[in-house]
Amino acid sequence: MAFLPLCIIVIIAVTSATVNSCPPSDRAALLAFKAALTGPYSGIFDSWTGTDCCVNWYGVVCDPTTHRVADINLRGDSDDQPILQKASGGRSGCLTGSISPEICRLDRLTNLVVSGWKGISGEIPSCITSLSSLRVLDLIGNQLSGEIPKDIGKMQQLTVLNLADNAISGEIPASIVYLAGLKHLDLSNNQISGEIPADFGKLRMLSRALLSRQIPPSLLSNPGMGILNLSRNGFEGTIPDVFGSKSYFMVLDLSHNNLNGPIPNSLSSTKFVGHLDLSNNHLCGSIPIGAPFDQFEAPSFSNNDCLCGNPLKTC
Ligand SMILES: *[C@@H]1O[C@H](CO)[C@@H](O)[C@H](O)[C@H]1NC(C)=O
């Protein structure tokens, strides 16, 4: 009779070992991701060995219940990474290679941060839009090229989309307006703009705006957008006059484009604008009067064609 309990204990032990570790398919996807990256800092992947990718794999976090990979957090420019400092004393990391499409097999991923590595190139895998649980996609500070996947609007959980400081081209996909929960959009310092096919049906108005390289009005009127940085992208035309009393921006940076015309009056009716940068455009006319404008200083408006009024010279 002593045999039976022992047997049960063994079965429980085996079962829990299997359940508690990372699924082989997630592990394989991570290893494929690792294999596509090289460079002086590839030592950050030294800990990516062994069968359980949920334990001690640098930058990898699993969901405690499902044991599926939930976060990949690899920042090349972070100060708080002893591993990087140890690697060669520098703070700006460098990884080269590309982002493997195998990453799309991690279908429970909620955070994907691969930022500040300077040398990661190639395109953003188009399958990334199938990661329907993804909330944070942060690939700032690499050398990614190609276009933003057209169906980015499928990623309904997305709150942060940060693709700044890369070499991404093409237009802002029209579907981006469907990202209802988006709070932080930073596409600055890329080569975004350019033409899109005209047959957009419902979205024809938006596509017309994009054809003329204008800022999509819906991005500015979206009340949930806390941080919007479209600096350095070659946007043309006027700033759409679509702000409203619900608009709330911690950061609104439209600097270093080719925007012309006046600063829209509706911007003075917004609930809050913490940081405004309209500098280095071709704006002209009087700076609106109203609450958010009281706190802005001249640098927010510098290097335009003919802006006037507080805090610049009187009109
Ligand atoms: C917007 O992006 C540009 C370029 O990446 C950066 O220099 C600037 O500081 C950003 N603006 C804010 C307010 O963070």
Image (cartoon, helix red, strand yellow):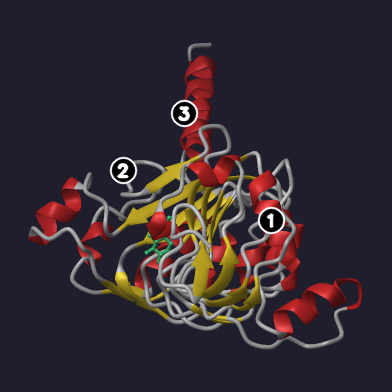
User: Residue at left 21%, top 48%?
Assistant: 79
Q: Which mark is residue 265?
A: 1
Residue toward you, 148 or 42: 148
User: Residue at left 46%, top 62%?
Assistant: 301
Q: Secondary structure at mark 2?
A: loop
User: Residue at left 31%, top 43%?
Assistant: 56
Report whether residue 256 is seen: yes
Q: Amino acid at mark 2?
A: Asn
Residues under numbered marks 2 and 3 in contact, where contact means CB atoms less than 8 Å apart: no
Residue 300 in the image: above or below residue 4: below
Mark 2 vs mark 3: which is more N-terminal? Answer: 3
Query: Rounded to the nearest whole Å, what is the CA distance between mark 3 and mark 1?
Result: 67 Å
Query: Rounded to the nearest whole Å, what is the CA distance between mark 1 and mark 2?
Result: 53 Å
| Residue tagged 3 | 13
User: Residue at left 18%, top 71%?
Assistant: 40
Query: At which x and y percent is residue 214?
Result: 67, 76
How crowded is the residue under tag 3: few (<14 C-alpha within 10 Å), some, or many (20+)? few
Q: Amino acid at mark 3?
A: Ala
Q: Secondary structure at mark 1?
A: helix
Report whether residue 187 is seen: no
Query: At which x and y percent is residue 12?
Result: 52, 26
| Residue tagged 2 | 56
**Image side of residue 170 versus residue 216, left or right:** left
Residue 58 in the image: above or below residue 262: above
**Ligand 1 location (quadrant):** bottom left
Query: Rounded to the nearest whole Å, what is the CA distance between mark 2 and mark 3?
Result: 21 Å
